């Protein structure tokens, strides 16, 4: 019986190890924990497969001010806002040598640029980029083929946008690395397709600018890096080339994904990350869960044994009075021999003992 308890406990422990990562998901757009088409779990997994240390942060203070790392913000949600404390942390991080990759279309990206004091040099336009000629499935999925050769865009010949916008560049210290096709134009982002600027023309969609000792990379469509779009055109190659360039090829440089500016940061993910970040805590939790399960099983078995003891032996477990049984049988069947009856009862008792032993 104890062996069966241990087997059950082992199954529970394995189930915990397997199910915790499966439960550690969300449906939030652009979240690195979202495994659906609109999440960014594949981008994080790609960075990990390339050998980088990856993590997600739920408060901006977690990135620190040392400037070590590449901080990826995918369409920060407008409902969250960008607090003064966040601005101070991000300023220190980038000024001290960190890299900010800000991919935004209709999110809160301009608030981030304003907090960093660079909104006069570059902003996200906020209108929908469309193209009736250089396009994918429709005009709202333009193909970007005007890409400047650089280490950041190595191997990238075409990007596939999905309801993106463009960059308004007015600063001389901004380097444009990609533009939309000359046939592209702008329309309102929410329904109707009303033309904002009927004049077609190439517009910036990817750019970089220096910031202190660090660097800011701006991409006007975060959907390039979501699970459903990462495999399209050279979208994945862009991420690979960017990480290689921005880290200088140093795999020790951490790639950090922002979860602090999601509409509803998942509490379970936060708890999971805190536990999973420390192997001692992680395996202690698993052991405690397993121990609690084993104790529960044994406690239940003990209660049942005590209940049986209080109720007394079951009818088929009552002690047998051999002589009384034989006398009853002989009275009913005088022709039966007492010696043979004793032998039969002895064999019956032996069989019962053997069954109990099994």
Image: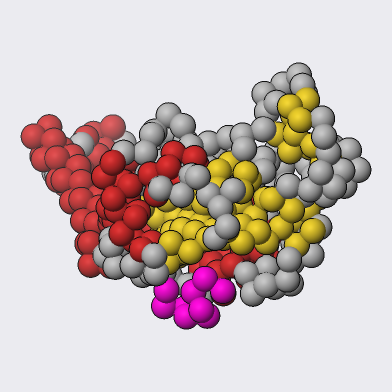
Magenta-drawn stretch contains 248:
yes
Query: Left or right: where does residue 347 sit relative to residue 147?
Result: left
Name the quadrant containing residue 300: top left
* Residue shown at the point (73%, 71%) measured from the top left: 149
Magenta-drawn stretch contains 256:
no
Relative to the observer, which residue lies in front, 334 or 319?
A: 319
* Residue shown at the point (40%, 55%) measured from the top left: 56
Query: Residue 235, relative to residue 265: is it above or below?
Result: below
Say which quadrant the C terminus sits in: bottom left
Relative to the observer, which residue lies in front, 223 or 131?
A: 131
Relative to the observer, which residue lies in front, 339 or 163?
A: 163
Write down the region rendered in magenta: 245-253
> Residue 282, percent across and down?
28, 61
Q: Residue furthest top?
A: 192
Query: Left or right: where does residue 139 sit relative to residue 265?
Result: right
Name the quadrant containing residue 70: bottom left
* Residue shown at the point (12%, 32%) measured from the top left: 311
* Residue shown at the point (79%, 48%) measured from the top left: 202
């Amino acid at each position: 019986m104890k062996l069966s308890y241990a087997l059950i406990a082992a199954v529970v422990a394995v189930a915990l190890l397997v199910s915790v990562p499966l439960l550690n998901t969300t449906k939030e757009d652009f979240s690195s924990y979202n495994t659906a088409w609109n999440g960014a779990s594949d981008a994080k997994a790609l960075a990990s497969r390339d050998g980088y240390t990856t993590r997600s942060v739920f408060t901006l203070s977690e990135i620190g001010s040392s400037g070590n790392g590449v901080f990826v913000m995918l369409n920060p949600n407008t409902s969250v806002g960008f607090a003064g404390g966040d601005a101070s942390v991000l300023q220190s991080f980038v000024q001290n040598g960190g890299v900010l990759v800000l991919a935004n279309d209709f999110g809160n990206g301009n608030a981030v640029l304003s907090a960093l004091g660079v909104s006069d040099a570059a902003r996200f336009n906020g209108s929908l980029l469309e193209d009736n000629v250089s396009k994918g499935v429709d005009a709202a999925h333009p193909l970007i083929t005007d890409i400047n050769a650089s280490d950041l865009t190595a191997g990238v010949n075409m990007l596939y946008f999905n309801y993106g916008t463009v960059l308004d560049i007015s600063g001389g210290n901004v380097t444009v690395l990609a533009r939309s096709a000359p046939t592209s134009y702008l329309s309102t982002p929410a329904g109707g397709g009303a033309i904002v600027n009927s004049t077609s023309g190439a517009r910036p969609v990817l750019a970089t600018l220096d910031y202190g000792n660090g660097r800011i990379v701006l991409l006007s469509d975060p959907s390039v890096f979501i699970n459903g779009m990462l495999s399209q055109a050279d979208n994945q190659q862009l991420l690979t080339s960017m990480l290689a360039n921005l880290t200088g090829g140093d795999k020790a440089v951490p790639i950090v994904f922002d979860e602090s500016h999601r509409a509803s940061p998942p509490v379970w993910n936060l708890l999971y990350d805190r536990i999973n970040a420390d192997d001692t805590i992680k395996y202690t939790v698993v052991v405690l869960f397993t121990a609690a399960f084993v104790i529960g099983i044994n406690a239940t078995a003990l209660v049942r044994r005590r209940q049986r003891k209080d109720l007394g032996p079951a009818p088929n477990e009552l002690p047998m009075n051999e002589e009384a049984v034989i006398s009853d049988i002989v009275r009913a069947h005088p022709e039966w021999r007492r010696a043979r009856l004793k032998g039969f009862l002895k064999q019956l008792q032996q069989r019962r003992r053997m069954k109990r032993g099994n």
